Image (cartoon, rainbow, N blue to C red):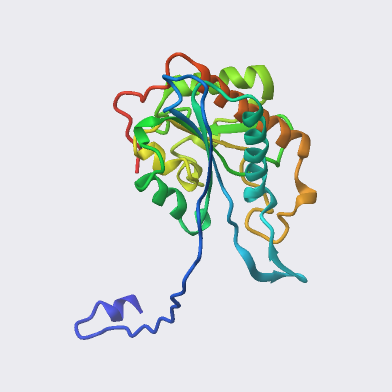
Amino acid sequence: MLAQLRQDGQGVEIHIKSEVFDYPSMNIIAVVGGTDPKLRDEYVVFSSHQDHDGVRFNMGDDSTWNGADDNASTSVALLAIARAWVKQPSKRSALFIFHGSEERGLLGSLWHAAHPVVPLSSMAAVLNGDMIGRNHPDTASILGVQPPHRNSQSLVSMAIEANTRTGKFVLDSLWDRPTHTEGWYFRSDHLPYARAGVPALMYTTNLHQDYHTARDNPDRINFPKLTRMTQWMYLTGWIVANSKDRPTIDPGFQLER
């Protein structure tokens, strides 16, 4: 067939059916003001996406994709962190962003990075979580810890310090490698901020067989692990928010794509 198509005068006719529809979405943003008169205009940003895929094709008798791990896990983590932050605010302010339309191509974070509610230059760090409640109880990953994905060694050091004090996870660095077939670093809401020059990390317990299926239900969440991941994100943010010096961007940071 290819040989025929290469002959002069040959062609192919293709009929494509497509749909265009409105996809209502929003970013939900809250702030807890800082206590230091000089630092309160800087922000540690806690990030999640609050959307999933909704009602899709049936898997047995279930057509509802609940997205318990992806990404209700981080959404409830941010609610818990925000509740703690209100009780004990930090020197820098804290911004909590529940992005919309992540599943449609990071649309919520792309929009907010282009139209931020506070200047990007005032964001000391973005701590993004995506799928933080599954897999082995003692392993986890932070993405953005090794070149070319690392844009702030100082932020990585703070996150690792926090892990030694609270989460105490064995860190799996394979998912952060540029050669990893999943390209996981490029698939969550820290990415637009990292590209915009904000120190950024992604916390995750990585993919599993229930990813983007109707099986991603609350009864499969490892709640003790989710609690530890939440504490790890909280403590990293607390270190950032109270440090004298904020994280800095590594010189020459450039992603592979």
Q: Would you say 51 lies left or right of 217 here?
A: left
Which residue lies at the image location 58% right of the left edge and 43% below the top edge? 130
Residue 90 visible: yes
Measured as percent of width and height from the top left, residue 17 is found at 43, 81
Image coordinates of residue 4 in percent, x first then y, are: 29, 81
Work out which quarter of the rendered image holds the C terminus and state it.
top left
Q: Residue at x 42, y 15 (%)?
A: 245
Left or right position of 124 against 77: left
**In this orientation, which residue lies closer to the viewer: 83 or 251?**
83
The answer to which of 186 and 29 lies nearer the viewer is 29
Q: Which corner quadrant of the image does residue 124 belong to?
A: top left
Instruction: Single out the residue that lies furthest toward the top.
Output: 244
The residue sitting at the left extreme is: 8
Q: Is residue 155 above or below residue 60?
A: above
The image shows residue 177 at horizontal and vertical percentages of 47, 35
In the picture shown, does residue 49 fall above or below 56? above
Q: Nearer the viewer, residue 14 or 105?
A: 105
The quadrant in which residue 13 appears is bottom left
In the image, 70 versus 141, the foreground residue is 70
Q: Residue furthest right?
A: 219
Asked if residue 168 can be seen in this view, the reply is: no
